[in-house]
Each structure stands twice: as structure tokens, then as C-alpha cells.
Image (spheres, rainbow, N blue to C red):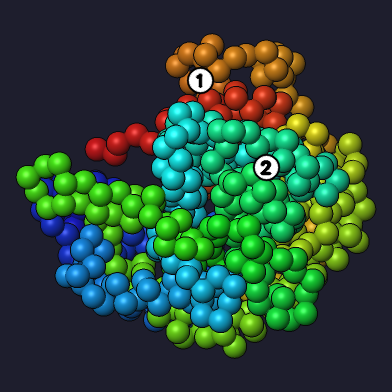
Amino acid sequence: MSDDQDNGQDTGRALPEHGLPAERVLGDVKALRAGDRPTHGGRLFAYVYDPAVPGLDELAAAAHASSAHVNGLDPTAFPSLLAMENALVGAASRLLGGGPGSTAPDVVGSVTSGGTESLILAVKAARDARPDVAAPRIAVPVTAHAAFAKAAHYLRVALDPVPVDPVTLRPSAAAVAAAIGPDTVLVACSAPSYAHGVVDPVAEIAAVAAGAGVRCHVDACFGGWTLPWLRRLGEPVPPFDFAVAGVTSISVDLHKYAYAPKGVSVLLHRTPALRAPQFFAYAGWPGYTMVNPVIASTRSGGPIAAAYATLRHLGEDGYLRLAAATRDAVAGLADAVRGTDGLRLLAEPESTVVCFTSTDPTLDLFVLVDELTARGWHTQPQLSYADLPPSVHLTVTAAVAPRVAEFGPDLADAVAAARAAGPVKLPAELTALAATLTPDALTPELVAGLAAALGLGGPGAGPGGAAADGAGGFAPDATVNALLDAAPPALRERLLVEFVGLLQRPTY
């Protein structure tokens, strides 16, 4: 009899009546993982960052395991974690223009769980530094990461979106200046923006913010660990870090191009005084006095130890080599796009992103994404926004470099197949519904009907490109993306909330 039969349990149950052997449990996890996108191999252009360095995964996993049960709640109890966190902050500070001998010698920082937490804390620090402002606001380019909107929502701060030029995909300093008012507590810019990979005019924006007496945060979560190495390689990287006088804080994710495991980000402030409002302290109860630099109280030391080990193993020379390989991969992929009829780069690559759109009405980008997936290339479709067209986003890592030669022919084949298939044709009533339906009009019955029609909501289904594939994973679906693209942003949000709600149901 199998272990399942012996215990009378379903394989997917998290809490069986009788415990299972360790090898069986690990086998179940491996079986579940079989339906995921490939995290290694250079064919996944989103979500994961793979340097293709032999032995690095094993080193990071061992370091993680060594500190997984260490708690960052009290740094005096676990000085090892404090030492590693301070070392990571120091490395990030030095790389981004701070530290001894720089124009920003007093930079301090904190390790967070990811870019979203770093941005939330940057907004919190700016808000709490201005108790005189009853209704604080932040000015953020529309191309800035959605985590700023999340921070504004969580912290009850008003979000003032700054338009970008539809050609350069950047905000102008004048547009930022126009968005700053007496209640503005923070101005943000990207280095680079995630969607298109272009660096905002940080120096000009920071000068405008400084002139208005407002903090300026540079979201370098995506590119902060690559742009400095690209600059050392001779690439024309514009000023974006603490070398720019008006920059007051910077965020950089180590689980991106520092190639550490998820989730580790660093939030830096130019001075301790700027960081002080980031902390939360509370002594108004009979337990221990709580003092937290980040949102979480209990924090596992595993991710911090894994990041520490990764940085020490790769070193500056390793990151320089990885940046060079990534730069060459970006150039090769961009050439493949340029050489494909019907496609154009939405922006000339400046960092580690290749972003392209269609110039041919018969070439549906969402169908192209499906065709690329069928050929083993997992890309990220981006919907249209205002006067910006839909696009395909490729996050390029060092692991992509050996696969670049394969991409061009597969891209050409996928384009030919997408043209032959033709654009997605939504039923007229569905198109009309997407154009006229308001988020408040979505009923559970209507959502369930839409989900069923689009192949969503069952086991293994996924949103945003989403019918279940044969392995139980997420298979991109041009029809789903076409529907979302036809809907205004507010309706897109509500549809995806409802669709994800259908997926996140307990397993009994």
C-alpha cells in the first residue's frame, strides 16, 4: 500500500492525520513544482533572476538554512543577523554613491522583504516626517511601479500621477514641478522603470523636489544593482544615485540583479534623520517595547544570510562579469526584435529590459505571447495604458546570454504563426460589456460566468493570461489579455481581484 492509502489522505492535504516520511513530503513538493514556470535556463523573462552560476543555489540554500530560525525582531539577541544586515546596507550604499569619502557619507538603511515593502516604508517615512500636513500627497510618474499606489492606498496618502512623454516614456521635470503642491511630501522617480526599462531624469527631478523642500525617492529596486556595473563597463548611465544632491532615499532589490534568493531589498536614506520616521515604536502595553525599522516584527534571518553569502561569493568582479553577459544578451535580443517585420522596440534598451510592440494590425501581441510560450519562451504581456500601446516585456538576466541565438528564429516563427492565426476576436457583447461595465456592477454570478467562459477559476487556472495547461500550471491566454486590454484600468483591477479570488480557495 502507498503512504496515501495507509493514511487515507489526499496528496495535497497540508495537515494529514498521520505524518508522512520526509522523502514523501519532498516528493510531493517536487511534483507540485513541476507545473511551475522554469526558474533556470534563460527562457523565463519575468519574476525570477538567474545568473547561471554553478553552485550558487546550493550556497544560498545552505546559508538560508543556517539562519532560517534566527529572528530579526531583536538584533541584540542575534548579533549575527545584525552584522549581516549592516554589511548588506553598506554594500548597497557604497554601490549607490554613499558611504565614506562620498558626498553622502552618512547613508543608513534597512533590509526589507522586497521592493514593495521598501517603497511603502519610503512613503511612510516621508508622510510621518510631515505631521503638519493633514492630507499628504505623493507625486509619482505613471510609469513608476504600482507599489507606490499600494503604499498610497495602505497609508492613506493621495497619489498624484505625473504624465510621461509617449515617445521617451519619461516624465519631465516641468511635469513633476507642476504636480508638487503644499501637501506633497514625496516625489518619486525610477532607475529604471520596470515596464520599459528607461531611466527617469533623476537629477532634474531631484533638483525640482529639493527646490520645493520635498523628499525625492529613487526607485532603483529593478536596476540599482545593474546600472553601476553597466557604468563601469562604459555604458552611458545617467546620474541617479546619492551622487545627485537632491536624492534623499533609494531602494534596491538584492533578490533581483544581486541574484540573491527571494526576498531581500534594501532601503537607503541619505541621513539617519531622514530614516527616523520609518521606525515604529510602541510602549503602551505591558509586554516588551516594540521597535521595528520595517513592517514585519518577526523576520527570518534566512533571506538575509542567503543574500550575504551570495554577495560575498560573487564579489565585484563576479557582478561585473554578469552585467557584461546581461548587456550582451540585451543587445542580441533587441537586434532580434529590430530584425523582425511588424515589431518595434518601444524604447531603446538602457538597462536590462527589452520591450517591444506591434506595428502591424494583423499581428496581435497577445497571440504572439502565446506562440512564444508554445516555443518555450515565457514573456510578460503588458496591456495598453492611456496613449501607450500594449507591449511585450523581457526582463533579461545573465542566464539568457547562451540562449540569445535561439530567440531570433523562434521569434520569427512565432510572428508568422500569430499572423496566420489572426488577432483575437472577442464576441461583440463581451467587448461592449468590457467598455461599459462599471466595477461596482460586477456580481458574483457575472464574474463566475466570465471566468467559466475564459477558462478561469478551476484548479490550476491563473489570471492575466490564464487557462490551465496540461501540467496544472498557468498557460497564457490571448483571449483573457484581449478582454483585460479592452477594459478600462478600474475594471481590469476588479476583474483580476475577482478572478484571483476564485483561485485562492482552501484545499481540504
**Residue lying at 17% horizontally and 65% vertically, measured from the top left:** 21
Q: Quadrant of the N terminus?
A: bottom left
User: Furthest residue to the bottom?
Assistant: 317
Check disc 2: other Cα within 10 Å, few if <14, some if 14-19, many if 20+: many
Estimate the x, y position of residue 96 in percent, counting from the top left: 58, 71
- Image quarter (top left, top right, bottom left or bottom right) of the C terminus: top left
SS at mark 1 in the image: helix
Answer with left or right where residue 397 lies relative to residue 459. right
Please tell me how crowded label 1 is: few (under 14), some (14-19), or many (20+) other residues with Cα within 10 Å.
Answer: some
The CA distance from mark 1 to mark 2 is 32 Å
Residue type at mark 1: give it. Answer: Val
- Residue receiving disc 1: 447
Q: Residue at x 43, y 74 (%)?
A: 88
SS at circle 2: strand
Q: Amino acid at mark 2?
A: Pro
Can you tell which quarter of the image residue 177 is in? top right
Residue 341 x/y as whole percent = 92, 53
Residue at point 67%, 54% (across, down): 206
Identify the residue shown where x is 49% and y is 55%.
115
Q: Disc 1, disc 2: CB below 8 Å? A: no
- Between 28 and 126, the one lying in front of the other is 126
Place of residue 207 in the rendered image (x, y in percent of width and height, measured from the top left): 70, 53
Residue that label 2 marks? 141
Is 233 displayed left or right of 184 in the figure?
right
Taking 88 as reference, is 111 above or below it? above
Q: For marks 1 and 2, give the one nearer the viewer.
A: 2
Q: Nearer the viewer, residue 339 or 487?
A: 487
Regarding residue 410, the answer to whether it shows in the image is no
Specify which label sits upstream in the sequence, 1 or 2.
Answer: 2
